[in-house]
Image (cartoon, rainbow, N blue to C red):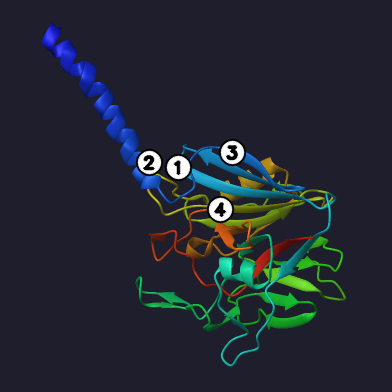
Amino acid sequence: MNTKRKIRWAWLLPLVILILFGGYFLFTLGRPAPVPMKQELYEGVTYRRIIRYLPHTMIAHVIVIDRKAGRIDFVTTPPDHLEDGAVTARTTSEFLEDFELQIAINGDGFFPWWSRGPADYYPQAGDPVTPNGFSAFRGDIYADGLQSEKPEPTLYISRRNELTFNRRPGNIFHAISGDRMLILGGEIVADLDDSAIHPRTAIGVNRNGRYVYLVVVDGRQPFYSQGASFQELAELLKDLGAHFAMALDGGGSSTLVMAGENGEAVVLNSPIDSYIPGRERPVANHFGVQIR
C-alpha cells in the first residue's frame, strides 16, 4: 500500500466509525440507551435493563420488588362506571400521576379499540373503555370478563398485598386480568408462541411470593428493539426467578413508568403507539406500586 493510500485510510476509517456511532446515537435519541444497567430506585425496588442481540434485538426493562423491604402496596385502576364503559382511558403516566404512585405498568386489553393511523385511533385519553377480563378495585368488580372470546387469566391482590394467579378468593380486593399465563408452578407453559415478535408486558412472582417482577419489552423499533415472543418472555421471567407469571396487554400498550423527583411520570421504556416511538397509548387499567 502506497503512502497516499495509507494517509487516506488513516483519516477515512475514523470518520466512518464516527458517522456510524453518530447515526446510531441520533437514532436512539429520546429512547433509553441500549446498554445494560442495574439501579436501585427505592428501598427494595430495583430497575434492570437487559439487552439481547440474538436471535434479534431486544431491550427488556425489569422492576424487581422485594415485598419485605418496606411498606409497599399494590393497586389497580379504580372504576369510573361510565356510560359505554367501565373506566376512562388513561396513559400509564396519567395513572401514576393521578394516584400518586411510584411505579406503574399497563394492564389488561380492552374494548372498544382501533388504530387506523396516528390521528385516527380509539381510545383517546378520557374516552370510555372496558377491560377484556375480570377487574376489581377494593372489592368493587367493574368488569366480569364474560364478553371476552377466551377466558383470561387473572391476578388477585389481597389486602396484605399478596399476589395469586387464577385462584379466586372469597373476598376479592384488587384484580386484574391478562393475555395468557407464561409460567405455572415454575414451569414454562407448553406451546407458547415463539414466532410473533412484539412489545410485551408481564408480571410474575417468585416461589414464596416475596419478589414481584414487572417486565416490559420494547418492540417494533428496527435496529433498536424488535420485541419478544411469548416463549422468549416466559424464558426471561423464568431466568429472573418467577414461579408464576402472566402476560398483560402488549403491543402499543406496553409501558413502564416511575415517579420523578416532583411526582411527575418518567417513562422508563420506549412505548410505540401507532408506530410512533415514545408515544403512550391510553389504556383501560393498570398495575401500580405505592411506596410509603
Q: Amino acid at mark 2?
A: Phe
Tell which of 129 and 66 is nearer to you.
66
Specify the amino acid type for callout 3.
Met
Residue located at (55% from left, 78% from top): 89
Q: Which amino acid, mark 4?
A: Leu
In the drawing, what numbered circle is on residue 32? none
Q: CA distance from mark 3 to mark 2?
A: 18 Å
Residue 108 position by quadrant: bottom right
Q: Which residue position is annotated with label 4? A: 268
Classify mark 1: residues with Cα within 10 Å, few (<14), some (14-19) or many (20+).
some
Counting residues from the start of the chain, the first of labels 1 and 3 encountered is 3
How far is mark 2 from mark 4, CA to CA?
18 Å
Residue found 25% across the figure and 27% down from its top: 15
Number of other residues with Cα within 10 Å of mark 4, as a class: few under 14, some 14 to 19, many 20 or more:
some
Task: Kindly report which numbered mark, 1 or 4, lies closer to the viewer in this rendering.
Answer: 4
Residue at image mark 2: 25
Name the spot of residue 113 as percent of width and height, x first: 48, 77
How far apart are the alpha carbons under marks 4 and 3? 12 Å
- Split into 4 quadrants, where in the image is the N terminus? top left
The mark nearer the N terminus, 3 or 2, is 2
* Residue at position x 87%, y 76% in the image: 171
- In this picture, residue 59 sits left or right of residue 152: left
Q: Residue 182 appears at what percent x and percent y? A: 65, 54
Q: Which residue is mark 1?
A: 57
Identify the secondary structure beneath mark 2.
helix
**Residue under label 3:** 37
